[in-house]
Amino acid sequence: MHYDHSLWVHIGIGSLAMALFWATFLSAKGSPLHRRVGRPFFLAMVATVLTVPPVVLLRPVPFDPGWIVSLVYLSACVGTVVTVAWTAIRWKDQPERFRGLHFRLLGPLVAVLGAVVLVAGLVKGDPVAAVLSWVGLAYGTAMIHFAWTHAPLHRQWWLAWHVNAVLGLFTAVHGTLGFVVWRALVAPDATRADAAAWHAGVLVVALLMRVVVGRQRQLPWGFFDRSAQPLRRAALGRRLKGQRN
């Protein structure tokens, strides 16, 4: 396979993923159509990741270890976020299964990779790497916290994970593929700084979408029931006071 062929396959599948995202996002949440379109979207995201290695390895440039690190990092992040988005729905009644061994392994993995990419980006002066490091750092840290915190869960904890993960996938598709299309059609001389600005802008859009969905569904940013925390603290205080007496 030639580089151009691998690139067009990647763009084609990525475009399909983008179309399926909007078909899923605009459909009634929880409806048969939402589920029917959402499953192919997740599969398209996995297929998009699988088409990245040929693009990276067939590039007509000298071998660059940095690209391999980027490939591993982005593949791990997308694979992790797809897994979280899928299992949050499948195991919404089984929180301990959701944050089981796979969850506790993937969280630290993407967090460490995110830190490595951030440091590498700062050392090499690559703004794109620095911006993209947020995926591993944000999701990895959140997964570690959720895995090891056993406070009462919010009744829609699973939906918060699902929505956060899907919007993370939104940034992956629209950040990478969107910039490629924009550069090809509008700004062929776009720099790495322009790419970083594009990714940051897509992230802002995703956060605004999260605000809108959160208000529509009364969905918290976190996953734990804050209303139960004062009661737990009060109960703990009474228990400690009783022990002292």
Image (tube, rainbow, N blue to C red):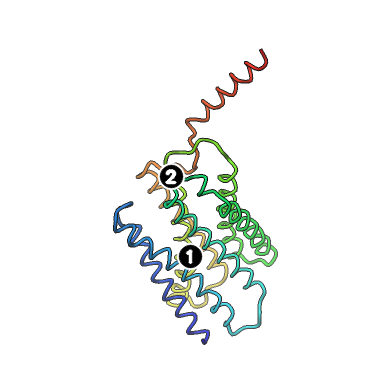
Mark 2 vs 1, N-terminal side: 2
| Secondary structure found at label 1 | helix
Quarter of the image that includes the C terminus: top right
In the image, 165 versus 152, the foreground residue is 152
Residue nearest the viewer, comparing 236 with 216: 236
Relative horizontal placement of residue 25, taking residue 7 as reference (left or right): left
Residue picked out by circle 2? 93
Which quarter of the figure has residue 58? Answer: bottom right
SS category of the residue bearing label 2: loop
Residue found 32% across the figure and 57% down from its top: 34
Q: In this view of the protein, which residue sits in the foreground, 178 or 194?
A: 178
Residue 45: percent from left, percent from top: 45, 66
Residue, disc 1: 175
Looking at the image, which residue sits at the far top?
Answer: 245
- Point out which mark residue 224 bears: none
Residue type at the position of mark 2: Asp
**Circle 2: is it few (<14), some (14-19), or many (20+) Cα within 10 Å?**
few
